Amino acid sequence: MTPLNNLAEFASTKFMGLKNYLYKHYGEEPGKMLVHTGVLSWTLSAAAQVMAIVFNDKISKKEKLFLIPQECADAGINILSFYLVTNAFTNFGTKLVKTGKLTTPLIDKYIKDNKIKDIGKITTDISKDMPPDVLNEFKSLKSGISVLTNTVGSILSCNILTPILRNEYAARKQKEILTKENKNPNLQSPAGVQIFKPVSMSAYQKLAYTKFSGSDMKI
Amino acid sequence: MALAGITSYIKSSSLYKTVQSGTQRVQQAFYDCIPNGSITSEKWQKRIKWVGREISSPENRLILGVTALMSQPFIDAHNKSVDEQTRKVSVCRTVAKILAGTSTGVLIRYGCIGAINKWSKLPTSVNKMGQKIKLNKLNTLFSPSNAGHELSEAVKQYRNTLGTILSLFVMSITNFVIDAPLTRFLTNKFIDKYAGGVKNDTSK
């Protein structure tokens, strides 16, 4: 047996539980998959940024003590805003279909024929006991709506909410550092600082130089 | 086991139940405001189903990239917390970062999903000529045992999920090897052209 076959056999048997779990949990829920892999994407991206600071010899230990928690806080904003907004939108879309609020004529007919009560109640699941043809229609509609609402939620959180929150947070942090520098002459920037004015180009570059790249570099 | 115990303890606590019922009441009030609707147009039914079937993480990343180009530069351009020159550099860097991140993100996601498709064959899988593929250890490396023999929609979504997860680990490396240098290169190009040529050292 070749080493590649050995590896293949090892992987196919050892990770069967994981593969079956992924199939069972995400096979019919593409919207949920996009939320969870999105969170994983932000988490890995943030972890890579932290590692880049930890292993950067050009950054002093004292600066690392400040930069690492700052990077973690930044990651927290990214991950939380992404998860809360995108997950809320995806759940909203899925529940619209699951509770019978949003239907197609075929699903509508099934609801009327079976006299299903509590339409629109959040604990209702109209897919229980559905015949295969209606169930197929239901699953396709649920997948489509969950991907659509997920996309709207992702756009809102990644492209509007997160950049605004991050800009606000970054500007505040930069001003804090510049205030500290001004109080301690040993740390003062040679270009001079403007504490209460908008952050200048030189101060922006000096402070950003210590970082490998922006923490908003989503993978 | 310990985690399951903690979870069941939290779920049985009265505080959890109070919070849960409160959240449900708020959710219900929100849902009650939405009128019931039925999608009668066949064209729209087809479109929605197509989205669920065909839009996965590479397409999602592309949509996010395109919409990011339409929103983030404007947010940076109106950031009053920094001076005008910084705003210009920040816009150039944001555009460069979106272009670099989106192109590598989309390509690597497609590549990894393609690789998983090759290595998760089922007994009914056929090649481009329509002939049955002979299964071996390698091309069934990622085939789930609970998927049955047919290439169902769920199997396609499973492949997308596994491919996306694999791509995220690949991108943890390419983020530094490709994205960061490409972002720096593009940023400096844009600054030369649009922001008066102030060199950007921020992505070192």
Image (cartoon, grey):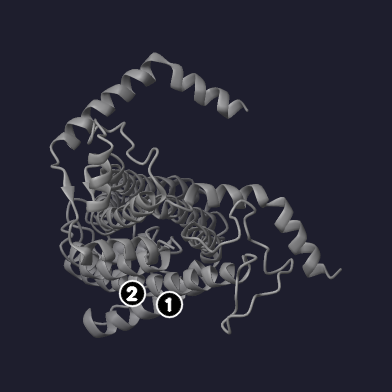
Which one is in front, A16 or A154?
A: A16
Which one is in front, A133 or A153?
A: A133
Q: Amino acid at mark 2?
A: Ala
Residue A184 in the image: x percent, y percent?
A: 35, 47
Quadrant placement of the C terminus of chain A? bottom left
Which one is in front, B41 or A200?
A: B41
Quadrant placement of the N terminus of chain A? bottom right
Q: Residue furthest top?
A: B14
Q: Which mark is residue B96?
A: 2
Q: Residue furthest front?
A: A113
The residue at which mark 1 appears reads as B182
Q: Which mark is residue B91?
A: none
Residue at 33% x, 66% y is B50
Q: CA distance from mark 2 to mark 1?
A: 8 Å
Q: Is residue A118 left or right of residue A76?
A: left
Which one is in front, A190 or B137?
A: B137
Report how many numbered discs are placed on residues in the image: 2
The reply to whether callout 2 and callout 1 are in contact (CB within 8 Å) is yes
Q: Is residue B15 left or right of residue B194?
A: right
